[in-house]
Image (cartoon, coloured by chain):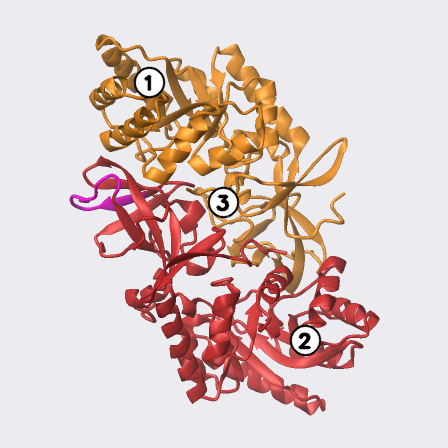
Chain colours: A red, B orange
Amino acid sequence: MFDRIQTPAVLVDIDVAKRNIERFQTYADSHGLKVRPHIKTHKLPAIAEMQLDAGAVGITCQKVSEAEAMVAGSGRLNDVLITYNILGDDKLHALVALAGKVKLAVVADNMTVIDGLSAAFAAAGATLNVFVECNTGADRCGVGTTEEAAALAVRIHAAPGLRFAGLMTYPPVGGAAKVQAFMTEAKALIEARGIAVPAISSGGTPDMMKAHLAPIATEFRPGTYVYNDRSLVARDVASWDDCALTVLATVVSVPASNRAIIDAGSKTLTSDLLGLVGHGHVLGRPDISIDQLSEEHGRLRCQSDINLTVGQRIRIVPNHACVVTNMVDGVYVYGKDKAPELWPVPARGKIV
Amino acid sequence: MFDRIQTPAVLVDIDVAKRNIERFQTYADSHGLKVRPHIKTHKLPAIAEMQLDAGAVGITCQKVSEAEAMVAGSGRLNDVLITYNILGDDKLHALVALAGKVKLAVVADNMTVIDGLSAAFAAAGATLNVFVECNTGADRCGVGTTEEAAALAVRIHAAPGLRFAGLMTYPPVGGAAKVQAFMTEAKALIEARGIAVPAISSGGTPDMMKAHLAPIATEFRPGTYVYNDRSLVARDVASWDDCALTVLATVVSVPASNRAIIDAGSKTLTSDLLGLVGHGHVLGRPDISIDQLSEEHGRLRCQSDINLTVGQRIRIVPNHACVVTNMVDGVYVYGKDKAPELWPVPARGKIV
């Protein structure tokens, strides 16, 4: 099926992706939770449309240019949340333009960001929905206390050009109880100031099937769930059969009986470890470890005879699917009834 | 100088790059060593031309598509070594076409690769230069014994469409003595079979100023030396002032007194560690560590007050320069007499 594809290449089983999308949507529907998938995993407007078709309310992007690429690639992506503190005139102008095309929201965790958003949108006579980002233990962005969350909500509520949209968090794995406690308290504090909290947004694929443990959340932003990867199999939340994204590689050298070299290195698989040992899982060969990557070589090791030949092709489930789709201009999409087809990845490399 | 550049962005100081190029060329010239820089670091035809201008005999590429992009980008890159085992009809056809445009050489460490190259070039009535890749301790590709090297040299020498070009290795750091010993013995074995060894090619920036410790080598392939990076400063072979490539980033959040978040994550800095702790060096702030990357966020930590404000810009020397230029469609090139200018990176993402 993949004989005519040059390696290394990124393959996507569209049937598996569809099944993954539907599985979480069914769960979320049963708990009255809205789904707003993070497109960072696939970066493909067509898959975002599949997510909408399954019942998603909109999409999540991480950067302004990423949102622009997704919106430009589909007339149907008209509800976008950018989960990022946005700063700087160029990005603010782009944001104002984007808000003229779609229902748009962003997040903020500090006054400087809020003031910049307000100045840009008030000057344009436009209105932007702004969530307050809260830190529920991941220690990345987000205010650390419910009092700060309330103070920022008040600031947004009062700011010309802005509308307070609610609370947002990206919790650590196992963080549902913290999300529930923080958000319940923050919501009460904000409502006590006479401001409604229209939405509470949480996310993270590893815990997505436990989202009901934080019932205060009204929407959930899973990303990796659409493809899954070795990190999620290691966490027991997916099986190898649930992994829609694989890397096709060719054995280019078997320099020792227990070692082989493939033509996929860190420029395809990336160096992301996500706490794992090794750089991916060779399908059908659990006895092999990928113990070293250089940019264009991957080294495979085996305790016994590796039993691979030069020219042979293998398929690898990478540690982290999202970063792999950022390495290639196109992915080969295939399915039960679909021969592999090269799809460009419009939101690849959109870092600003 | 960089105020109008959206972040994150990759900056290249062209004066520093030029100085780095000239420094190694001077050393190599003084030892009668030819220089064949690996373009994987910059991926820019214009910088490859600077390397030729300084005295390089040609360039090194790792993949066929990378070589195609470089040759297409400059009429002057007419001597190319691809240090890779090349397999598969599509790549072999591309190789034949490329050999019609430039002086071309590749490497091989097994019979399957040699037979494929021979079939393609003999069928096209063309000739390809082929080096034997030798393993001198890095345990990636390469034959492990001098007898195997000699056997492959004989095979190449006898193969229609191929010309034996010599021996090639990518040694581990500190491997000069092993290179000298292996290559001396392999050369003697091959010459004893009546076959000349026209060239012996070694490489690796960390040990480039010790290349004279393996005087059997006739050419050297440094890559990272043009930009340098945190890994080379850690090895004491470059200073921060020698680092031509930096990542410009903006502080987007200061959620705690000892923590700040920047808008550059693994999609810009990459997760390459190269044995280091942390993900880059903040220029002028040796007290800060970049302790965590997610795709679009970098987390900065400090033992005491981090003393950064939202909106402030910082510059980071990444752990590994080569992989960073693969993440962006363009880099901002600037110098003493040159305002920053966006240069596309034609050989980015060329993995096949």
Q: Earlier in the sequence, mark 3 or mark 1?
A: 1
Determine the secondary structure under disc 3. Answer: loop
A66 over B221 or under it: above or below: below
The numbered disc on residue A130 is 2
Q: Nearer the viewer, residue B208 or B141?
A: B141
In the picture, residue B154 is in which quadrant?
top left
Q: CA distance from mark 2 to mark 1?
A: 66 Å
Three-letter amino acid code of the residue under disc 2: Val
Task: Quarter of the image for the C terminus of chain B: give it.
Answer: top left
Chain letter for mark 2, please. A
Tell me the residue at 52%/58% (across/down). B295
Q: CA distance from mark 3 to mark 1?
A: 30 Å
Determine the secondary structure under disc 1. Answer: strand
B93 over B286 or under it: above or below: above
In the rendered image, residues at marks 3 and 1 fall on the same chain: yes
In the rendered image, residues at marks 2 and 3 fall on the same chain: no
Crowding at dot 2, Cα within 10 Å, few <14 / some 14-19 / many 20+, comes out as many
Crowding at dot 3, Cα within 10 Å, few <14 / some 14-19 / many 20+, comes out as many
Give coordinates of residue B107: x percent, y percent.
35, 27
The numbered disc on residue A25 is none
Q: Nearer the viewer, residue A35 or B121?
A: B121
The numbered disc on residue B163 is 1
Three-letter amino acid code of the residue under disc 3: Gly
Q: Is residue A307 magenta?
A: yes
In the picture, residue A90 is in which quadrant?
bottom right
Hey, which residue is sitting farthest right in the picture? A123
In the picture, residue B14 is in which quadrant?
top right
Q: Mark 1 and mark 3 in contact (Cβ < 8 Å)?
A: no
Determine the secondary structure under disc 2. Answer: strand
The numbered disc on residue B349 is 3
Dominant secondary-structure state across the stretch colored magenta: loop
Q: Nearer the viewer, residue B295 or A265?
A: A265
